[in-house]
Image (cartoon, rainbow, N blue to C red):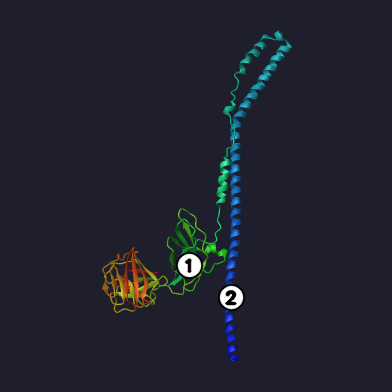
Amino acid sequence: MESMSKKNIIETVDTAKDYACKLEDLLSSVKGANDQIQTSTQKTISEIDSTFDLLVSTLLESLNKRRALLRTEALRLRDDGLAPLKACRDIIDEKLRVTKLYIEEGRNILRVGGLTTSLEKTLCFTEQASLLGSLPAVPNLEEVADLSFQCPVESIVPELQQCVANIGQVSRMGPVQITEVHEKPGALLVQWEEVDYERVVDVHSFRLQLAYGDVRGQDHLQLSNYHDAYVGPEGQHLVRDLRPGVPYTFRVCCRVEGSSDWSAWSLPRVALTHQEPFCWGESNSNYLITNEKKLASKTSPEQSVLLSSTAQFGPGHSIEFTVLECGIGCSDEGLGLVTGPVEGENLIQPGCLFVNTQGSVFVDGAEKTTKLPSLQKCSKVCFTCENIRDGKIRVNVDSNNKTVTYDWSVRCPLYFAVCFGEMGWKVLVE
């Protein structure tokens, strides 16, 4: 009985320890949430202050520039108006000076001798009266400048106040958040959703950005490191050409209908893929493999099948072939998926889903009714796959906006392959 009691106590203590560990984990989560709120609040207040400081200084600078320009314009108009008046004043002053001298001369004649003055001097003085001439023209007040300043302050001030009242917005969180990130070969499938359900305007487009490495909380790295990975209406995007084992930071925002401004960013999400990117095998001497083993170039005139380096393709994957250079193309040349190494140098056989250069589709060697566009330079053929049940998959083949779907009884993963006899074909896989 005593041993049973001791055992129960030990089990109870162990259970309590597990419970305490879980409580500590919850405390850690609460601390993380608290830190996020405090840090984001401090950052937001700092951004508010810096933004409004910039607006205030810019507005004052603009107002002072405008004031200086208006003052300069007023002084220019003043000078333009005063220049002819100064010339007129100079003429009048000169005529007034001459006239006063003439008056003084007449007074002197009268004071000295009156009629006893010589007739010659009297006649000379009288003749000078004709030099007085007409009075100079002086502009009326209606003809000269009368400067004034117009500024509809009564209407401008409310507009400014309304404009200022609409500056900025503090958001509890970004209206779009990253919800899932799935690993793909050399890629990550990033999915996001709207979380602002009170928004009454439809979202027009989304913007996904990524940065190399984990840049969370490193503001000095965010401006220079982030770059656009996708802009469009979809709620997910496959980000390709990623290095396996290397972390990447993602964020997403949106733009609503009728607006040119992007919303606040989502919380950053760090993710990485451990799956190697799709690449060609390098053992076939009839093909030159370049561009990090993504580009296969046919270099010999012999019919030859080239397989991927390993069996990489399966449910949830998407693989795209791009024809960079092409030849004439025969019915047994093309690209597709295979279950493993094939017999002979063609892909029209069991265990192959094959699209030839004319657009015909063969599944396990049997030609299907529906045809796809023929393979030409810059053609793109995309294979996607989903699992139906064990040993059976559904494959979608898209080429030049035309899609066909086949249920195929095979086991994954699959190889991808090309088969060409003519030289010059170049196929990029992503």
Q: Quadrant of residue 106?
A: top right
Residue drawn at the location 58% of the way across and 70% of the way down? 30
| Residue that numbered label 2 is attached to | 23
The image quadrant where one finds the C terminus is bottom left
Q: Which mark is residue 92?
A: none
| Residue that numbered label 1 is attached to | 179
Q: Nearer the viewer, residue 422 or 66?
A: 66
Residue occupying the far right of the picture: 112
Residue drawn at the location 44% of the way across and 65% of the way down? 236
Q: Nearer the viewer, residue 210 or 161?
A: 161
The image quadrant where one finds the N terminus is bottom right
The spot of residue 57 in percent (x, y) is 61, 51
Q: How many marks?
A: 2
Q: Quadrant of residue 141?
A: top right
Packing grade of label 1 (10 A; few <14, some 14-19, many >=20) is: few
Packing grade of label 2 (10 A; few <14, some 14-19, many >=20) is: few
The spot of residue 288 in percent (x, y) is 37, 73
Sequence-first tag of 1 and 2: 2
Position of residue 164 relative to residue 38, above or below, is: above
The spot of residue 290 in percent (x, y) is 40, 71
Residue drawn at the location 59% of the way across and 62% of the way down? 41
Judge depth for marks 1 and 2 and give the one in front.
Answer: 2
Q: Secondary structure at mark 2?
A: helix
Q: What's the residue type where badge 2 is placed?
A: Leu
Left or right, 4 with reference to 323: right
Q: What's the residue type where badge 1 is placed?
A: Thr
Residue 221: tell me if it is visible. Answer: yes
Q: Secondary structure at mark 1?
A: strand
Q: Quadrant of residue 393?
A: bottom left
Give how far apart the Cα atoms at labels 1 and 2 are.
Answer: 26 Å
